[in-house]
């Protein structure tokens, strides 16, 4: 196990049942390690704002894994700059509202289908974009703000 910050291990960012099943090597390339480290530092602040632990359900995704799970090719997950997570703090919407109110920095915060929260960070400019993902006619659409 490789410790990144007080509460986050590298393995939390790379584990993936899909990658295991398909025998995809989802380890983080050396050049992306600074991004994952940055994400872990931001997640410590997210954890603090929630006052509850975070369970990362999807962190880093190598391009092969990202394609398998239907992620967009430019996904911040492939750069080590985004995670999907849950928390015992509350529902995804409650988590998002708390993070907005707390002033925590993020590039993109997405309440996804009332099931999980996506949070992404930028190395240079966190834009504080908030979206809600919903299914409309079988397709995922992103609405502005918390809906
Ligand atoms: Zn995501």
Image (cartoon, helix red, strand yellow):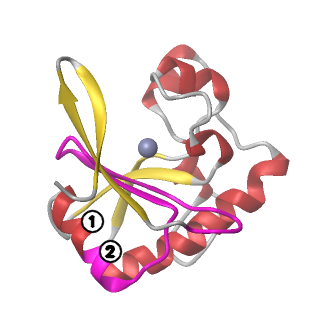
Q: Position of residue 47 (x, y in %)?
A: 38, 75
Q: Nearer the viewer, residue 145 or 100?
A: 145
Q: Quadrant of ligand 1?
A: top left
Residue 122: % across, % down: 63, 62
SS type, badge 1: helix
Tag of residue 77: none
Determine whether the residue tagged by mark 2 lies in a helix, strand or loop: helix
> Is the Cβ of the residue at disc 1 closer than 8 Å to that at disc 2?
yes
Please tell me which residue is depicted at 59% across the width and 64% down the height of the picture.
Answer: 39
Which quarter of the figure has residue 95?
A: bottom left
Q: Is residue 58 left or right of residue 73?
A: left
Check disc 2 and report the residue beneath it. Answer: 99
The residue located at (69%, 39%) in the rendering is 27
In the depicted structure, whether residue 56 falls above or below residue 88? above
* Magenta-drawn stretch contains 111: yes
Report the quarter where the C terminus lies. Answer: bottom left
Looking at mark 2, is its residue's CB closer than 8 Å to ligand 1? no
**Residue named by callout 1:** 96
Q: Is residue 21 left or right of residue 53?
A: right
Q: The magenta stretch spans which residues? A: 98-126
Toward the viewer: 14 or 73? Answer: 73
């Amino acid at each position: 196990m490789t410790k990144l910050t007080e509460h986050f291990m590298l393995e939390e960012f790379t584990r993936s049942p899909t990658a295991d099943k398909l025998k995809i090597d989802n380890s983080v390339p050396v050049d992306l390690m600074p991004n994952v480290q940055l994400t872990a530092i931001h997640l410590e602040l997210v954890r603090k704002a929630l006052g509850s632990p975070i369970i990362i359900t999807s962190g880093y995704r190598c391009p092969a894994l990202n394609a398998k799970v239907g992620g967009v090719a430019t996904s911040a997950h492939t750069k080590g700059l985004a995670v999907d997570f849950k928390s015992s703090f509350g529902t995804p919407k409650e988590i998002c509202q708390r993070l907005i109110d707390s002033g925590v920095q993020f590039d993109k915060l997405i309440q996804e289908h009332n099931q999980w929260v996506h949070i992404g960070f930028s190395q240079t400019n966190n834009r504080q974009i908030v979206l809600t993902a919903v299914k409309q006619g079988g397709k995922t659409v992103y609405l502005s703000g918390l809906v």
